[in-house]
Amino acid sequence: MPEDQIKPPQPKSVLVGPPGSTREIAILHRPAETRPEAPALVWLGGYRSDMSGTKAIEMDALAAECGSEAIRFDYSGHGASGGEFRDGTISRWLEEALAVLDALKPTRVVLVGSSMGGWIALLLARELRRRGSLALDGLALIAPAPDFTSELIEPHLTEDQRQALKDKGYFEEPSEYSPEPNIYTRALIEDGRANQVLKGIIETGCPVHILQGMADPDVPYKHALTLMEHLPADDVVLTLIRDGDHRLSRPQDLEKLRSALATLINCD
């Protein structure tokens, strides 16, 4: 579609959770223009990221060019959504992802999960298969971090951090991506143990494309190899980017993402 004819996505919101735990989830929805039969691209962001990031915008731009549907949203405590970040857990953010899909009612989806969003994408894929009401056409996972709390954080906790979790219920550490420190709560870590996916075979029933930087300081590329081992029944393509970091937001990285997404939604 010509750029001058591309419309902006529509801001929407959905309320999630029971009274006393309700939060308003902000959504940017791009309805299909010319390809209503094509799967919707659904953005699942990373820890402390939001739907206005470079890769999320790139996904939306591809959908616009292809005339396809695209859905972006912010988890509670992130970006434009309500709720407190410290209340966030994998289960809570998964609940919000399901609520967004229930509200917008796409018939087919490709889940695009970045970092922690890759974990949520795998959990969401399992739930969608259980429900059987929504077709899952593919997963695109960017530096996926399934089980990151138990696999990448807990084994490396210092004694001070373990004590802070016990005494205060959280610990902080500096972030390379923000002046504000990362906060990891006891609730997040305990809930992460209950949502582990790397404990057995993962069956998504759809093609999976993984993009992983080999110079990623946050999610080692061997974590992506481990994930592949747990997807023996799926058609999995792993693209290793030798000098790629965790963000994978350089022009050459974004081009690889566009190529993977175009293949999954069959957009030439």
Image (cartoon, helix red, strand yellow):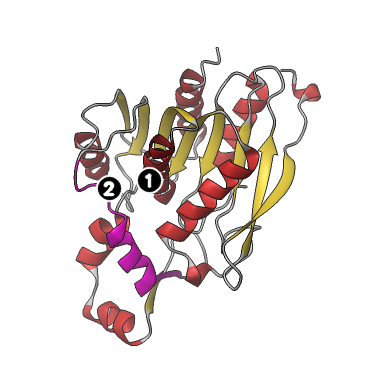
* Residue at 36% from the left image edge and 29% from the top image edge: 208
x then y, percent, for residue 255: 50, 27
Q: Which mark is residue 234?
A: none
Is 99 inside the magenta-drawn segment? no
Q: Which of 260/138 is in front?
A: 138
Provide the residue designation for mark 1: 123
Q: What span is in magenta?
A: 181-200
Check the image and name the residue furthest to the bottom.
Answer: 167
Amino acid type, label 2: Val
The first of marks 1 and 2 along the sequence is 1
Secondary-structure class at tag 1:
helix
Which class describes the residues within 10 Å of circle 2: few (<14), some (14-19), or many (20+)?
some
Question: Left of 159 or right of it: where is 80?
Answer: right
Residue 53 visible? The answer is no
Is 186 inside the magenta-drawn segment? yes
On the rendered image, what quadrant is the C terminus found in? top right
Secondary-structure class at tag 2:
loop
* Residue at 32% from the left image edge and 52% from the top image edge: 217
Is 21 placed above or below 64 here?
Answer: below
* Residue at 57% from the left image edge and 66% from the top image edge: 18
Question: Left of 222 or right of it: where is 192?
Answer: right
State yes or no: discs 1 and 2 in contact (Cβ < 8 Å). yes
Question: Left of 109 or right of it: where is 202?
Answer: left
Quarter of the image where one finds residue 137: top left
Provide the residue designation for mark 2: 197
Amino acid type, label 1: Leu
